Image (tube, grey):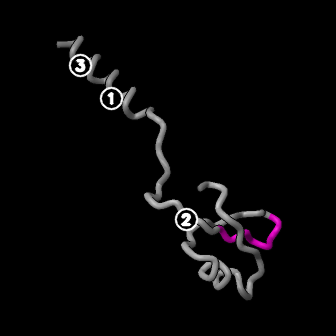
């Protein structure tokens, strides 16, 4: 019984340590590159027009997603 419990715990530990996958099931083709000093990107745009509308007024540029 103890061996079975130890085996179950070991299996749970191995399965929970598996590498995770991307969180989005869709790979978006456009990213907004913020104009601030951080260089942060937001890659959730399906069209360039959506991206440009997002960065208009606040600065930044749109780039092709490096994750595709």
Q: Residue at x 24, y 11 (%)?
A: 3
Q: Does the magenta stretch include residue 16?
A: no
Q: Residue at x 66, y 56 (%)?
A: 66
- The one of 57 and 63 positioned closer to us in this rendering: 63
Question: Against 68, is 9 above or below?
Answer: above
Q: Position of residue 5 (x, y in %)?
A: 23, 19
Which residue does the numbered mark 2 point to in the structure image? 28
Q: Which residue is drawn at 68% across and 71% down?
A: 32
Quadrant that contains the N terminus: top left
15 to the left or right of 3: right
Q: In which quarter of the image is residue 16?
A: top left
Which residue does the numbered mark 3 point to in the structure image? 5
Evaluate if marks 1 and 3 touch, with contact meaning CB atoms under 8 Å apart: no
Instruction: Identify the residue at the far right of this view.
Output: 37
Dot 3 alpha-carbon crowd within 10 angstroms: few under 14, some 14 to 19, many 20 or more: few
User: Residues under labels 3 and 2: Cα distance?
Assistant: 44 Å
Q: From the viewer's perspective, is the residue at label 1 or at label 3 nearer?
A: 1
Question: Against 30, is 18 above or below?
Answer: above
Q: Give the range drawn in magenta.
A: 31-37
Dot 2 alpha-carbon crowd within 10 angstroms: few under 14, some 14 to 19, many 20 or more: some
User: Residues under labels 1 and 2: Cα distance?
Assistant: 33 Å
């Amino acid at each position: 019984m103890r061996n079975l419990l130890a085996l179950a715990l070991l299996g749970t530990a191995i399965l929970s340590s598996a590498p995770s996958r991307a969180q989005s099931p869709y790979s978006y083709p456009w990213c907004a590159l913020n104009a601030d000093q951080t260089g942060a990107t937001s890659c959730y745009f399906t069209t360039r027009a959506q991206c440009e509308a997002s960065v208009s007024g606040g600065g930044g540029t749109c780039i092709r997603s490096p994750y595709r």
